[in-house]
Amino acid sequence: MHCVQKITENIYWVGGNDRRLERFENMFPIPNGVCYNSYLILDDKTCLMDTVDTAISRLFIDNIVHVLNGRDLDYLVINHMEPDHCANIEELVKRYPDIKIVGNKKTFQFIGQFYDFDYSMNIHEVKDCETLCIGKHNLKFMTMPMIHWPEVMFTYEETEKILFSADAFGAFGAMSGNIFADETDFEHHYLEEARRYYSNIVGKYGSQVQGALKKLSCYDIRMICSLHGPIWRENLEYFIEKYNVWSKYEPEKNGVVLVYASMYGNTENIMNVIANKLAQKGVKDMRMYDISKTHPSYIVSDIWKYSHVIFGSVTYNMGLYYGMESLLNELKALNLQNRKVGLVGNGTWSPQALKVMNEIICSMKNMEIVGTPFEITSSMKNNEEEIVDKFVEGFFINLIGC
Ligand SMILES: Cc1cc2nc3c(=O)[nH]c(=O)nc-3n(C[C@H](O)[C@H](O)[C@H](O)COP(=O)(O)O)c2cc1C
């Protein structure tokens, strides 16, 4: 049966939820599921904003048929050509052969690359800032390359002042009936997952997001409709400001994330000792992760949030432990900047971990090594506590000075 909601007088949410998918992009665990949003505008012409993933195709078609109530579908706007939003294009062209697909040059290139059906009679190609009037509603298309694919567009509906923002302003997490952010306890339910979504998926493209925010600042926006996560119709500034901070790679909070790679527990032990000593100095809300236990997307997300991070790793075959090396390289690939970093290495016969971690961190932008990095040979002895104290003292002074 159809499952839709009105979001304004003539616009409907026709998306759906997926709580069965284990991993988004076959990579990121989504214990709270995910939603695929799509929106249908009824006016002189009917217009659908994006489609959904194959997982919910059947419901999606039911939703559209129900809302159209016998009308034809005139336009399908493709703001983003990623397959989790595009699974139904062919089906819609079959059902509504006169439909016009609205996209830019790259959109049509990607449709041709992903799918094998004839849409040559359905193309309505638009350029940046072009508009399309469908009655009382007027759609303005803004190309937003690399947020987070090159063909991405935002569509601004000028009459009701709604921004259809593709994947931007999205979040992991299925919706439980409450499709508006103001109907949810967003800070507790969605914020962490919105940050994990942003940092891991869009994080690399901070400068493009900054560009988009600048472009959008000229528009009066009353509602933001993303392709994932809740719709924003109140307190939009709150979430826009989160995007502003995240895309500038600025920490949201002064605090410490500790991440370790440890096989036999000695590096783990030192990280616990460091955390204890920092706690005794009054540092609160620290987060500690075992790289082999927690999916890196959660660690990336917390590092995006906090100002300081301490990495502790064993040496493995003259290099870094695999999980730690891949985390550090991922942070670098995501363009993470402006963090203060403490380093602790470990090795038994030829310790290399500290050197390799230091090299990766120093190759990133605006990363500062704080505290005196140190290396353990196998395990730390009670009579070596002075080294840890020296590290903690330097790290703490920097932390409280921030
Ligand atoms: C497969 C393997 C490769 C290792 N390679 C090195 C190495 O190249 N250099 C070194 O100094 N230690 C090496 N180690 C030793 C560990 O780094 C070391 O025992 C570490 O001090 C233990 O710390 P942990 O108790 O936190 O696991 C290796 C250990 C294993 C299991």
Image (cartoon, rainbow, N blue to C red):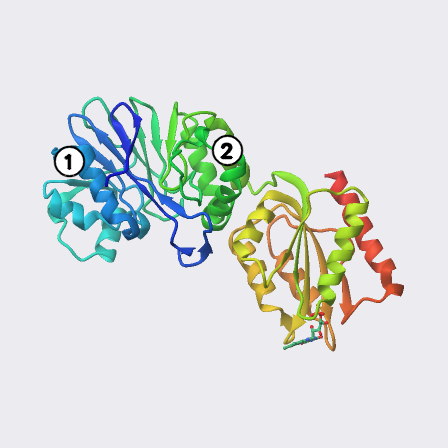
Which quarter shows the N terminus? top left
Residue 395 vertical position relative to residue 217 in the rendered view, above or below: below
Which residue bears the numbered disc 1? 74
Residue 252 placement: quadrant: top right
Q: Earlier in the sequence, mark 2 or mark 1?
A: 1
Mark identifier at residue 185 = 2
Separation of marks 2 and 1 at Cα, in angstroms: 37 Å
Q: Left or right? Give the position of 369 relative to 322.
A: right
Q: Residue at x 60, y 48 (%)?
A: 303
Q: Secondary structure at mark 2?
A: loop
Q: Amino acid at mark 1?
A: Asp
Q: Position of residue 16 (x, y in %)?
A: 32, 42
Q: Secondary structure at mark 1?
A: loop
Q: Left or right? Give the position of 354 relative to 177.
A: right
Q: Amino acid at mark 2?
A: Asp
- Which of the pair 16/396 is nearer the observer? 16
- Crowd tier of the residue under label 2, counting other residues whose Cα lies within 10 Å: few below 14, some 14–19, many 20 or above: few
Q: Position of residue 80 (x, y in %)?
A: 31, 45
